[in-house]
Image: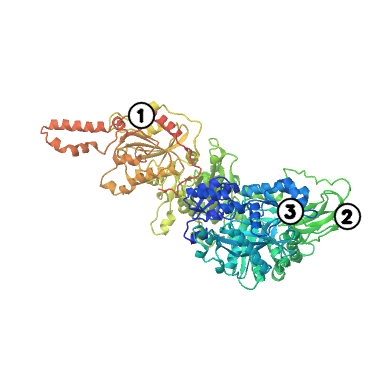
Amino acid sequence: MRAAQELGIAPVTIYSSDDAESLHARGAPEAVALDGSGAAAYLDIEGVVAAAKESGCDAVHPGYGFLAENAEFARRCGEEGITFVGPSVESLELLGDKSRARARAAEHAVPVLPGSPGPVTGPEAREFLEGLGAGGAIVIKALAGGGGRGMRVVTAAADVEEAHARCRSESEAAFGSGAVYVEELIARARHIEIQIIGDGTGAVSHVGERECSVQRRHQKLVELAPSPTLRPEMRDQITAAAVRLAESVDYRSLGTFEFLQDATNDERFFFIEANPRLQVEHTVTEEVSGIDLVRSQLRIAGGETLADLGLVQASIPAPRGFAIQARVNTEQMLPDGNIRPTGGELTAFHLPAGPGVRVDTFGYPGYRTNPNFDSLLAKVIAYAPSGGFETAVQRLSRALSEFVIRGLETNAPFLGNVIAHADFTSGGIYTRWVDDNVEALIAIEASAGEAAAGAAGAAGGAGATLDKRDPLASLTFFREGEATSQRAAPEIVGPSNTDPVPAPLQGTVTEIHVAEGDTVREGQLLFIMSALKMEHVVKAEFGGLVRSVTVEVGETVFDAHPLAFVEPRDVGEAIADDDDSVDIDYIRPSLQAIYDRRQFLLDENRPAAVERRHSKNRRTVRENITQLIDEGTWVEYGPLAIAGQSKKRSLEELIRKTPADGLVAGIGSVNGDLFDAKRARTIFISYDDTVFAGTQGGRGHEKTDRMMELANDLSLPLIFHCEGAGGRSGDTDGSSAGHPYVRTWEKMGYLSGTVPMIGVTAGWCYAGNAAILGCTDIIIATEDSLIAMGGPATIEGGGMGAFLPEEVGPMSDLAPAGSVDIVVKDQDEAIAVSKQVLSYFQGSIDEWEANDQRLLRHIIPEKRGRAFDIREVIRILADKDSVLELRPEFGLSAVTAFIRIEGQPYGLTTNNNAYISGAIDSDGSDKIARFWQLCDAFNIPIIAMVDTPGMMVGPEVERTGLIRHCSRLFVTGVNLKTPRFCVILRGGYALGALSVMTGNSRAQVFTVAWPQSEHGGMNMEAGVLLSHREALAKIEDIEERAAEYERLVAQSYEHVSALSVASRYGLDDVIDPSETRRWIAQGILSVPESEPLRRGRAQFLDTW
């Protein structure tokens, strides 16, 4: 892909459905998904060709696996006019069939191993092996493909059939062909391969050899370029043979011709196969030659010749230095030579770097390996242009040790052992060297671990053993001690006929209850260990004779370390566990202390504070909780917190006088009789006026912040009772950062639009409490409440005058100002209303009762201009006792209310014709727009009932900033996501009607009108005068003129009548008013999601 980009070619990669996270797919400018998963997707010829065509590719590079050697794939590419970046179809057919390739080699005097002339059956393979005589061995190999797949060594005739079946199966899965052939095995051979490049004109060059003798089970692990042990004359013979064979097929593109050299007689070499493709190990050739093989391959596919590329044989430089490639695989080598596949997520993946180090990989931190593909994870290449082969080995060793891979096991440590072995550096390796030495190679790694662990003690302790009597022992060790290994010690072998007593965990032995020679019964206590401040009992799992104890008191050991060895014997019945029966009613002292402390939270233990509350006709927080929260569901957070005043008050006084630090918080169920348990869960927070006058302490703020974080994380609604003053000045404990550090209002702001927040207050609510109250979505206040950002003391202290408390923020001021949504008589009603408010956000209810809807036919007077009671319309339309109006004393031109229809909650907005005829003014606009935002945030459907003569006009209303305020309706309405239903009751005039409809008449689920409704411009009479002035002026008789004027006015009103507008399809329908409820109930059934959202979708809500 990089080579193509450097040549100005836009690459497109392909990937299977389970390979989308691989780096080749993620890092490509364009990537195309194949149908299917695993190797099958990449072997699907038609699928790959289709992907190339659909993405507009004119060439396909097949990589070095899957279809890279498939002649049929190359043929299909050619048929579709796509260049196959590789050899010709004829070359692929010949060289891809290993039996034909062997025959072609023999024709050109290239030595080959004795073998079958073509594919063989199981019995034929057995016959060939038996024909070799005693001591003979064969290799069964796939006719197609390479890479060691579909390949088995067989030395016994009885094993041939099984090996033959396995080879066929592997070959079919990897290359799409199950044909196999056999060759005689050379027991000790070096694998030498020649890198060939040709241009299809007959010109062929070689780019030196690679040695790939380090293999496990015929699959390459380490590759070298050039071979450090190959004699020059033998190199010349092998490269000449490779070139000769390539020239015989007019070879085009890259290819590798592979040979075996007899390690016991280096005069003998044999051609084994040709890989007509790019090889995995091409990297080492690139390093020592300085030639970008892939770039050259692409240029040849584009029609250039070796001469064009400067790659005729005479121009190819001799290798410079040595390069070694190690294949890091997701696997572990086992002592028996088998491989244990590994896998998982790469939690860390840090590549080695430095001079002469290259890593080719598709991995990255967070990538999860795929067992459907080859285990190769990364190729680590080390190149030393000077200093000899040993320098390259050292560089590779460093690179492997620096390669940080976490999350899964790899063979990187094993590769390090291979290249560190003397046979590797001295040239003593051969193709079966790893298989013959696997136990020793794994033992190198194990012994290295044992040596390192020895620092922890011969018994395999975990870390150093310290004198537990000395409290400074650990500090002394940290300063002066020597490092110990983190790895486990070598396995301890016990006396014969014994079984170990393993440590159940890593920890320190604190007690030993047995000695050598003791008889122990099953269940008997043997040891006590300590780990992370917990004691763990170790009991005998069987009876017998203790033959050895391997630890001492104070010794720290790893888990599974043998603490003792016991010879199993019949020593009697097992020891039964201690009687576990307990008195379930017994209260431990530690639990009793908690109960005693909680007594200070209860009202009955705070009689003076309770009396003060009751004397003001107010209730305690605990009494409010009893009414609000369903019985048995309250869970309180932080009840044991006390005020942060330990420097000025005793602990006893703080416990007695400042329970919960004056802020009670928790989670409980509200309206559990109407909604399921999850919908009922609600967070409740309340300041306690009996603790320092409800001032806000530091720990109270921490609790508030904690509960708001829970509200956000759990998507729970919040009811906040705010009563008292602002920040407490007397706290002495905690942060010195002061007010700028307090995050309560930041978190309130983040919660806005995320969960419903209901604020409730009674009595005085100043400063910080008032600021919290103002951040909530809906404010409920008792009629005697006083709410202000600054109380009388603050006002006077600021030089702003002296006022009585009842003069600052009474409901007579704040309700008309719109600061409070609902004013109630007392706390009892406040809680009842807060439960009702919350219920609209909790969802639909099952039980409801409707009013007689026929009453709606008679609500609106027949005379056009006569006022009527809009609240009576709402009452009749809604379920009985379901209407809850917000801000009724503010924005009198508008009405906003929560209602239910057939149990479904709605937000209803309408105009109030009893005040300025329902015209749109600034306060009414703000009231409606803010209510729409609230409903929309939580998906409460909106019913927009329209009855307005239009926008309010005149200089006085313009001084209120009407153009900005009324325009909020246009901007807010069209951006609503919640379902909307529009009903035009009577006056649907001009821009005013459009503003309160939440858009035009087609923007809602439906827009219907009542029969008396009219839909036109504002002031029809004025419109007639302006448009017909000249015509009327020509009528000299005043009575005739008046009659004509009345006729024109009547004509205008007829034109804007509901029936007339519906005839022009300006409305969805004109309905019987008694059908309004049915239209809404049926309309909501057409909405995909009509229930309120548990988690709001607004970025935030306007507090105004």
**x%, y% of residue 56?**
46, 50
Q: Are the residues flagged by discs 2 and 3 in contact, CB closer than 8 Å? A: no
Q: CA distance from mark 2 to mark 3?
A: 60 Å
Please tell me whether residue 214 is drawn above or below residue 519 in the rendered image: below
Residue mark closest to the camera, 1 vs 3: 3
Toward the viewer: 810 or 379? Answer: 379
Amino acid under disc 1: Ile
In the image: residue 197, left or right of residue 783: right
Residue 557 appears in the picture as rendered: no
Residue 795, image quadrant: bottom left
Q: CA distance from mark 1 to mark 3?
A: 93 Å
Toward the viewer: 210 or 443? Answer: 210
Crowd around label 3: few <14 · some 14–19 · many ≥20 (10 Å): many
Residue 330, image quadrant: bottom right
Amino acid under disc 3: Ile
In the image: residue 204, left or right of residue 494: left
**x%, y% of residue 156?**
78, 51
Q: Which residue is mark 2?
A: 518
Residue mark closest to the camera, 2 vs 3: 3
Toward the viewer: 413 or 894? Answer: 413
Please tell me whether residue 43 is drawn above or below residue 435 in the rendered image: above
In primary-sequence order, the first of circles 1 and 3 is 3
Residue 294 appears in the picture as rendered: yes
Residue 510, image quadrant: bottom right
Q: Which residue is mark 3?
A: 138
Q: CA distance from mark 1 to mark 2?
A: 99 Å
In primary-sequence order, the first of circles 2 and 3 is 3
